[in-house]
Image: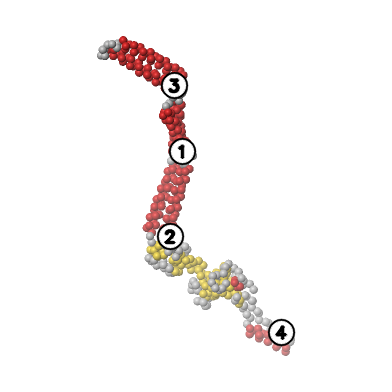
Amino acid sequence: MLAHFRPIPFLTVVLGLLLAGCSGATHPEAAHPEAEPIEEFVPVISATGEVVPVRWALLGAPTSGIVAELLVGRGDLVQAGEPLARLGDRQAAEAVLAAARLELVTAQKALQDLQAEAEVQATQAQLELANAQDALQDAEYKWRVQQQGNRASPEAVRAAEARLLLAEERLDKAKGDYDEFSGRPSDDPARAAALVNWENARQARDSALRNLNWYKGHPTEVQQAVLDAEVAVAEARVAEAEREWEKRRDGVAADELTLAEAWLANAQAQVAAAEAALADLEIRASFAGTVSEVYIRDSEWVTMGAPVLLLADLAGLQVETTDLSELDVARIERGDAATVSFDALPDTLVAGTVASIAPKAAEGAGVNYTVVVDLAEIPAQLRWEMTAFVDIQVEP
C-alpha cells in the first residue's frame, strides 16, 4: 500500500521549536512568534496504469473465407456500419439469397390464393354435399324398391295379374285362329296373318308374365350385392362431402392454412439465413472510430472468429490501473478525485475521477484490481497504452 502525505517542512519546524525554547528561557515576557500553519493531511493512494480507449473492439471474421477486398488501413477513421473488408464467394451467396426470395414470393402467393379462394371452395363444398345427399337418397330408394314385397303395391300386383289373364286369353284365341288355317299353304295370306297375331299375343303374354314375376320377386344375389355397394358408395361420398364442408364452411381449411403458413415461415427463415450469410461476407465497423490494427491481407484465408481488425474510439481515453493491491482498492470509492501524470508527458497533470472499480481481481501475478479513471481533459499528445501514474485521494 502506497500512502502519500503532504509533510510540514522539517527545517522550518525545528527552527521554530529552538527559537521558542530560547526565547522562553531568557525572555519569559516576550511574545511567542506566530507558528507556521500546518498543511492539511490528505491521504493519497498511488498506482501505475495505462491509457486505454473508453470504447474499443477486436473485430473477428463472421465466417471463413478468402479476403477479397481490404478497404481500410491502420489509422483510418471509419463510421459506424462502414464496410472494412469483404470476403470472397459473394456470387454464390447472392444466388442462394435470390432462390430464397423466389421461394418466399411463391409461398406468399400460395397463401394469398388460398385465402382468396376460400369462399369459392366453401360454396363448392356445400354444393358437393347437397349432390352427395341426393345421390344417397336415390341409391337408398332404389335399394328399397328392389326388395321383395316393395316392388309394387297390392293394387299394382292385382292389375298385373289381370293383364296376364287377358294376355293369356288373347293368346289362346290367337292360337285357335291360327289352328283354323294351319292346313293351308305357308304362303297363304290368311294363314300368315293368323301366325303374326298368335306371335304378338304370345309376346304380350310373356311381357305380362315377366312384369308380374318382377313385382312378386326379389333381387338375385348379384343384384343385391350391387344395390348394397351403390348405397355404401353414396354414404361414403356424403361423409367425405360433410368433412370437406366442415373444413371450409368458416373460411380456409385449418390444415391447408397451417401448411401454407408453415411454408411461408420456412421461406422467411431461408431468406433471413441467406441474408445473414451474405452479410457475413462483409466485416463492418460496429461503431465510429479509428482502425488501430489490421491483422489480415488481401487474398489471405481467414477462419471464422479469427481477429481481423482492432477498432477504437480514440476521441475518448481513460486510464486503467495495473498494480492496485487488494489493500489499497478497499479504501477507494467510485467518484474519488484523482491526479494523473504520464511518463511520456512529464509536464502534464490531468485531473480525474474514479469511474469504476473491478469486482474481481485481474488475471496475472498477485492480487491486483483494475480501477478505471475518467480524465477531465485529454492532452493532444496522449496515446493508447501510454504509461500513467494515478494518485487517488481517499478518506483519512
Between discs 3 and 1, the one toward the N terminus: 3
Q: Which residue is drawn at 43% across and 61% down?
A: 63
Residue under pointer 1 = 244
Residue under pointer 4 = 31
Closer to the observer: label 3 or label 2?
3
Identify the image quadrant of the C terminus.
bottom right
Q: Where is residue 160 in the image (x, y as percent from the top left)?
A: 42, 18
Closer to the observer: label 4 or label 3?
3
Residue 293: quarter of image: bottom left
Between discs 4 and 2, the one toward the N terminus: 4
**Could you tell me if the residues under marks 4 and 1 are in contact, i.e. CB atoms within 8 Å?**
no
Q: Which residue is drawn at 64% across and 76% down?
A: 41
Q: Residue 213 carries which label?
A: none
Residue under pointer 3 = 216
**Could you tell me if the residues under marks 4 and 3 are in contact, i.e. CB atoms within 8 Å?**
no
Q: Position of residue 187 (x, y in %)?
A: 25, 14
